[in-house]
Each structure stands twice: as C-alpha cells, then as structure tokens.
C-alpha cells in the first residue's frame, strides 16, 4: 500500500502511545525504513507486519489495532491535505458512504498504482444501510469498522455496526448492517 497508509500507522502509534513504542514496533516488524514516502507504493506485507508488531508491542489484538487505525485514518487524511476531498464526498454519513468509490477514483488520480477497495450501499432507509465491502486484500474488515466509527464522529452521527456476512466465513465479500442516527 502507499506510504501514506504506513505513515498513518506511524502517526497513530506516535500520537497515542509515544515515539518509543513506534521504534519498538518497527524493530519487531523488522522494518528498516526511516521515513515512509506518502507517494511511494510499498508491498502490503510491510503494512501487515506493522499491524502485527503493533499488536504485540501494545498488547492488543490485531483487529483492535486495525480498528484504531481505521478511526485514525479519517483524521489523518484530513490533516494531510485531503480535507477538501473529504468535504466534497458528502454532507451526511450515508451520502458519504455512497460516494466512497468516487472518492478513491479521485485519489487514484494522484496515486496511479492505487488498488482501492470497493463499497456499495443497499437497503438504504432513513436510519440504516447495508454496506458491501470488496477488496482483494484479506482481514481488513476491522479497519472498515474503525473507518465507519470515524465517519460517524465526523458527521455527528451515532453508528451501530454489525458484520452480517464475511469473506472469512466463505461469503463473496464482507457485508455490514449499519444503524445510524444523527445527533441533534
Ligand atoms: C481522503 C481520504 C482518503 C484517502 C486519501 C484514501 C486513500 C487510500 C489509499 C492511498 C489506500 C491504500 C491502497 C493502496 O495503496 O493500494 C486506501 C485504502 C483503503 N481505503 Fe481509502 N482513502 C480515503 C478515505 C477512505 C475512507 C473514508 C474509507 C472508508 C470506508 C476508506 C476505505 C479504505 C480501505 C478499507 C482501504 C484498505 C485497502 C483495501 O481494503 O483493499 N478510505 N485508501
């Protein structure tokens, strides 16, 4: 994945746990890269190793690290120059979800080797939506949960997420049922 992702993992660990923990994570992951370059594409293994090492160093499950990472991503991208893109992508929680593929199409204009996920909404009601998540990558559903929680905060919306079908259990893709309510 692009260095922007690895930098966001670094930012999450440094800001929430401190520089020492980040050094320990890099060492455990066996990664000898001083500075990730946002616009350079790195092997996915690097990102997965960072997550695995962070789980060990911080005594969390890998799923918990991925979820925290997903939640951090919505804040990190906003401060790294993608705030306008986030703003263009929707003015409510559900509108934003419906625009996720368009968002990544725009991201791909500056990241030509992007291998983005794909999201589709179905069964949209006033306070629920079924979100279909497709990716060629494995094991990132907890990251999506974190992303959805981060987006809930962004839109002042309470979200309740359940993974109703998963690739891990043989389904073609992951499917989340999300109940949401805008806070007034
Ligand atoms: C402006 C904000 C965003 C930017 C700049 C961005 C950019 C990226 C980039 C660079 C990657 C790595 C893919 C690769 O290198 O091949 C990625 C992956 C991903 N993005 Fe986004 N993204 C943004 C917002 C979002 C949001 C709001 C979601 C919410 C669901 C999302 C969901 C994902 C997921 C789940 C992946 C992991 C890759 C996979 O599933 O295969 N992104 N994105």
Image (spheres, grey):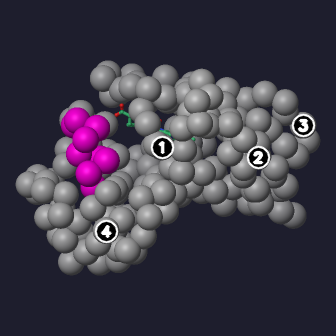
Quadrant of the rendered structure where residue 18 is?
bottom left
Q: Secondary structure at mark 3?
A: loop
Q: Secondary structure at mark 1?
A: loop
Mark 4–mark 2 distance (CA, rounded to whole Å): 30 Å
Work out whether 178 lies above or below 67: above
Identify residue for label 4: 56
The residue nearer to you, when weighing 72 against 169, is: 169
Identify residue for label 3: 125
Residue 14 placement, left or right of 79 = left
Q: The magenta stretch spans which residues?
A: 42-50
Q: Which is nearer the N-term, disc 2 or disc 3?
A: 3
Identify residue for label 1: 140
x, y percentage for residue 95?
A: 74, 36
The residue carrying pointer 1 sits among few (fewer than 14), some (14 to 19) or many (20 or more) residues within 10 Å by Cα, namely some
Residue at coordinates 23% horizontally, 66% vertically from top-left?
A: 25
Residue at coordinates 18% horizontally, 64% vertically from top-left?
A: 28
Quadrant of the rendered structure where residue 123 is?
top right
Q: Secondary structure at mark 4?
A: helix
x, y percentage for residue 32?
A: 8, 54
Work out whether 102 lies above or below 84: above
Mark 3–mark 4 distance (CA, rounded to whole Å): 41 Å
Report the disc number at residue 178: 2
Q: Is mark 1 within 8 Å of ligand 1?
A: yes
């Amino acid at each position: 994945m692009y260095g922007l992702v690895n930098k966001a993992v670094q930012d999450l660990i440094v800001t929430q746990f401190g520089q020492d923990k980040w050094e320990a994570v890099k060492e455990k992951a066996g990664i000898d890269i001083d500075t990730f370059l946002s616009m350079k594409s790195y092997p996915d293994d690097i990102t997965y190793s960072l997550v695995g090492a962070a789980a060990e160093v911080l005594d969390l499950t890998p799923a918990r690290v991925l979820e925290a990472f997903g939640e951090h991503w919505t804040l990190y991208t906003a401060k790294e120059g993608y705030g306008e893109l986030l703003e263009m992508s929707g003015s409510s929680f559900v509108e934003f979800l419906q625009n996720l593929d368009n968002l990544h199409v725009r991201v791909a204009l500056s990241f030509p080797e992007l291998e983005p996920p794909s999201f589709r909404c179905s069964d949209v009601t006033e306070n629920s939506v079924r979100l279909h998540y497709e990716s060629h990558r494995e094991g990132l559903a907890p990251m999506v949960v974190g992303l959805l929680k981060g987006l809930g905060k962004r839109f002042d919306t309470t979200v309740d997420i359940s993974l109703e079908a998963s690739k891990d259990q043989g389904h073609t893709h992951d499917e989340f049922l999300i109940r949401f309510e805008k806070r007034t």
